[in-house]
Amino acid sequence: MQNLRHTSKFFRRHSSSPSPARFFSSSSSSTPPLDQVGPVACRLVTRSVIRFRGPDSAKFLQGLLTNDVRPLAGGDGIPPSSSYAPTPNVPSRSPPPLYAALLTPQGRFLYDLFLYRPPAGDLKLDRTGSRPGSDSPDEPLTLLADVDAAVLDEILGCFRKYRLRSKVEIDNVSEELCCWQRFGGDLSNSDPTTQEPEAASVGWGKSDDLAGESAAQGNSLGWQWFKDPRLDCLGFRGIFPSKAIPPLVESDKETSEQNYLLWRVERGIAEGSTEIPKGEAIPLEYNLEGLNAISFNKGCYVGQELVARTHHRGVIRKRLLPVKFVDNSGKDIEQAVPPGSDVVDYTSTKKVGTVSTALGSSGMGLLKLTDAFKKPSTLSIKEKSDVKVKVIRPDWWPAEWTQLQEVQREAA
């Protein structure tokens, strides 16, 4: 694949230096969109890795996070969930990662994380590389969390504050481990067996040999890609040793993290405390239930009351939506809108919402649903009437959200 030039600058609540890798733009005629050139992969330099280790790890996290940790625990420390069953979004042979959030006691968003259980010893090759390793039954439960690097120290301090007498060690392991994302192309319609056919012919005489598969993928450490627990369209995600390139990452398909940001922004999917305002955001307004980050059956956790009450009332007047910035003729406008800009109805000057993230001609905004989808659209950026805002309804939205939005608009 030939190198492609950068086509735009980026605006975001936090700054990050762009990678020298190429950038794909959906609005430029000189560069193909990612869904045509993928799959590509990138190291997520804006994410860090925390390790929870100890007999109380699962119980500790179960009482804090919005999602159900029991499927990862596998009976370590808390009872298994009788309602849990593997989903088609992840391999059933290994515990799937989960996406979750930590909230304030008042139910406002603080931090998000991806929680993994690292591979057991018998799922890796031994030191000789000739056979599967062994797993000690006395080894304490270890869980890894992929978290926002911009607030890493805050996250560590917050978890340690809640630890009290729980038998769990909480450590920053970002020097040894890092996070990767593999996305684009047709990844959302594939699974590990169709991606890695060479692994099917490798075995130790068993029906399902993960250590052999890891070797066939060039990954003797047993680490693997998982389908992103939020949505199929986001591709695959994983935690890998920092000094190793993950399996299936071709040298000419490694790209900038800015491309992953663009991929998410175009689909209206926020990630991290820099895109979901810390201490302010209501989780359901940022679509966390649609991203599989919230369990409404798990029991108590910090901030549960507001989330449960809002969910059962079924009234959500604002949601995070992907938007396009265009001129009066409908042509995309690059680099025109900084985050924090107000979106208004230019016929009445009424505020409709706020731009949370802006990247070239694409962005995301928290908007009132009764105004966001009006036809014809009358939205623009405040004090920039020549910059119109085109709202996009994401394909992944559940049908009931759209139906409820239409009812709310009629009622208004």
Image (cartoon, rainbow, N blue to C red):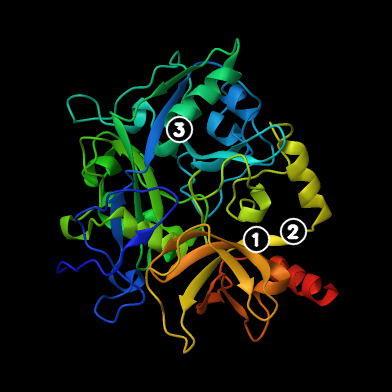
| Depth check, front residue: 144 or 302 | 302
Q: Residue at x 75, y 74 (%)?
A: 406
Q: Which residue is mark 3?
A: 117
In screen coordinates, is 293 left or right of 13? right
Q: Residue at x 67, y 67 (%)?
A: 351
Numbered mark located on residue 401 in the image: none
Label 2 Cα neighbours within 10 Å, binned few <14 / some 14-19 / many ≥20: some
Q: Amino acid at mark 3?
A: Arg
Label 1 Cα neighbours within 10 Å, binned few <14 / some 14-19 / many ≥20: many
Judge depth for marks 2 and 3 and give the one in front.
Answer: 2
| Depth check, front residue: 43 or 91 | 43
Q: Amino acid at mark 1?
A: Arg
x, y (%) of residue 388? 52, 78
In screen coordinates, is 310 left or right of 245? right
Q: Which residue is mark 1?
A: 319
x, y (%) of residue 267? 49, 65
User: Of helix, strand and loop, which one carries label 2?
Assistant: loop
User: Of helix, strand and loop, which one carries label 1?
Assistant: strand
- Earlier sequence position, callout 3 versus callout 1: 3
In contact (CB < 8 Å): disc 2 and disc 1? yes
Q: Residue at x 45, y 50 (%)?
A: 13
